[in-house]
Amino acid sequence: MADATPPPDALAMDMVLAGWRSQALVAFVKTGIADAMKYGVYNDPKTLADKCKLNADAVNRLLRFLSTVNVCIEEEITGGTYKLGVIGEVCSRSHPQSVTGAILLEGSKQHVSCWTNLSEFLKTGEKVMKITHGVNDYWDMCKADSSHLKIFQAGMGGYSKGEAAMIEMDQLSPTLDMSKLGIICDIGGGEGTLLQVLAQRFPKNSYILAELTEVVKNMDGTSFPSNIKLSATDFFKKETIPKANAYILKHILHDWDDVSSIKILENIKAVNPEAKVFILEFGPMPGPNIPHLSKLFDLHMAILLSGSERSQEEYNALYAKSGYKLTTTHLLAGGNHPLYIQEIDPLYIQEIDPLYIQEIEPGQLWC
């Protein structure tokens, strides 16, 4: 039997054309086609085009391609009509695990254009925001462009929907128990998607959604359950961090280099030296030649933010330098979801390696 694996040149071309596929998916979402398609029935491109104010022939050509990648399904007998595929369903804003926000963020011009300058990163090892967008920092771009800030917030919400679904059900995160922590603060928690799920699963706790002032001022605090409060917080200013028994950092540390990440953790420890912290990031990063989303996102974080995804050894070293130790890891969906949870507790002076004590500056020892 002949080998069905495509030849290397075909695989190389498939990789380079992946950018076309991603933009086809972005257009499917951005133009409203995903939301306009009725579930479970075949949709006529002209009807969809009229509803979305698009060109019917162009819509048909897009859907014809997307039917080859499970975004939609073309009717096989007569052809020319389409229904949502399994991928297309989660591209609808009404789907419980909708990834619409994440698609529009990662497919935005602001993000895609940074990837076109990946070769510059390879020369310097530095993020490419200046050469790409003329700003020093990604967050400066968000502050200057309120429309992209909204896309960013919605994108984080999009990631959170799928991740929160893993945490919402006991059977998908069976080792996670936050039932007796008391006050839990989600720092940089976006729209509060994760926190609302935790408030339902562990209702006896009180919760604080801590976000930047410009984010909080656009939120309606009355729309949250009574056990969730809002707090304007900058994690680089410890005086703004609310005191809690436990803190959550989801997709926060991967935005920052080691120096900044240590500062964030040290600020939390200064507010409550006894508090534990839950770190939610992509991983654990596997060994050589094994694919994982964390390896791709590592590049993404580097070119946008000077951040990184880390191996477990790198995380452990980061925690030790910040005054914490890893106590437990929680895999989601039996390790089949790319996110995992690291539970870290304060590291006390008697637990510190004497060789490490020689490396730290006076005044940095933890109580």
Image: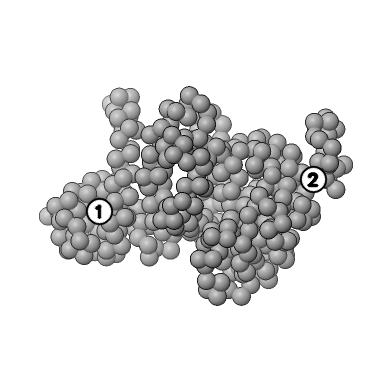
Res 177 label: none
Q: Compared to 117, does 165 lie above or below?
A: below
**Residue 317 occupies quadrant:** top right
Q: Residue at (79%, 45%) from the top-left corner? A: 347
Q: Is residue 245 visible?
A: yes
Residue 145, image x, y percentages:
43, 52
Near-viewer residue (131 or 10): 131
Q: Residue at (61%, 38%) from the top-left corner? A: 257
Q: Identify which amino acid the numbered label 2 is placed on.
A: Leu
Near-viewer residue (129 or 220): 129
Q: Identify which amino acid the numbered label 1 is placed on.
A: Ile
Res 73 label: 1
Q: Nearer the viewer, mark 1 or mark 2?
A: 2
Residue 44 located left or right of residue 90: left
Q: Residue at (58%, 55%) from the top-left corner? A: 188
Q: Which residue is mark 2?
A: 347
Asked which secondary structure carries label 1, the reply is strand
Whether pointer 1 and pointer 2 mark residues with C-beta atoms closer than 8 Å, the reply is no
